[in-house]
Amino acid sequence: MSEQTPTSKPDEADVTAAESVDPNETDTTAAASTPTPEPADEPASAGEAEPAATPVEPVAAATPAAAEPSPQQVVYVQAPVPPKVRGNRVVGVLLALLGAVIFAAVYAAAAAIPISLRYSGSGFSPAFSAFLQDAIFWIPIMMFALGFVVVTVILNRAGWWAHVIGSVVVALFVYFVSIGLLLLVRNVVAMTPSQAASAFGALATNPLLIAAALVAREVSIWMGLAIAARGRRVKARNVEARAAFDREQAEKKAQYGAASS
């Protein structure tokens, strides 16, 4: 018989011991025997920690005052104001009132001529005194002052030619308005039409009122010359002031343009 090599069989005791070991216990034992490395500092849970990209809100108490944004400053720049155009009305009115005083003196001197022709000798003085106290003397003076002032205000800085035309207006105003007011003073309303017409004709041909109209024209012409002369100077100053203002603005614009470029 041939010899067969006996196959070694595992020890039954070892097999029994191996089978009796619980696999769960083996895993636990292996896990216990294997050293577990300590984890690094774990980040906080997602609910507790903020993302790294989220900016931290500044705390008002900890923020220095210098870090606060300064409020925007508004700078107001005053627009250039052109020079005021000066007029001639105030001085013109004063000269017109001075002209009224001159008109009164010249009118009284002119009225003395017809009065002296009518009342010669000792009768001139009381007649002339009565004229100076009568409405026929004071009404033309007031009408001249009113008419000349209105014309002066309207003409303002106009030339002398305008005052020459205005003197005719002043003379007609003094003449016709004085006649109307004198008729009212003499109670023309209570007169009959024929009496009123007769009273109007007497006043219209009265040498005193004619002299008042002529004197009004002459005084307004020559006083208008003085007013026009000042108006011419005022216009020249206005032109010079405006030219200086325009030059100044042009220089400032040139400087700004050079600075911006």
Image (spheres, grey):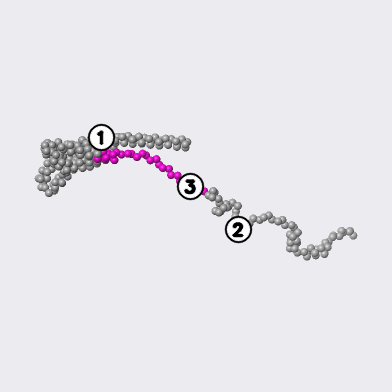
* Front residue of this view, candidates 208 and 200: 208
Contact check, label 2 and label 1, Cβ < 8 Å: no
Q: Which residue is mark 3?
A: 72
**Residue type, label 2:** Gly
Secondary structure found at label 1: helix
3 or 2: mark nearer the eye: 3
* Mark number, residue 47: 2
Q: Is residue 134 magenta?
A: no
* Front residue of this view, candidates 74 and 198: 198
- Classify residue 172 by image quadrant: top left
- Classify residue 118 by image quadrant: top left
Answer left or right for 77 relative to 145. right
Q: Residue at x 15, y 42 (%)?
A: 130
Local packing at callout 3 (Cα closer than 10 Å; few below 14, some 14-19, many 20+) is: few
User: Percent position (x, y) of residue 246?
Assistant: 38, 36
Q: Residue at x 12, y 41 (%)?
A: 202
Local packing at callout 2 (Cα closer than 10 Å; few below 14, some 14-19, many 20+) is: few
Answer left or right for 13 relative to 186. right
User: Percent position (x, y) of residue 230?
Assistant: 29, 35
Q: Is residue 72 magenta?
A: yes
Q: Which residue is mark 1?
A: 225
CA distance separating discs 3 and 2 = 41 Å
3 or 1: mark nearer the eye: 1
Answer left or right for 74 relative to 107. right
User: Percent position (x, y) of residue 196?
Assistant: 11, 45
Judge whether 10 appears above or below 212 on screen.
Answer: below
Local packing at callout 1 (Cα closer than 10 Å; few below 14, some 14-19, many 20+) is: some
Residue most extreme to the left = 194
Q: Which residues are the magenta region?
A: 69-97
Secondary structure found at label 3: loop
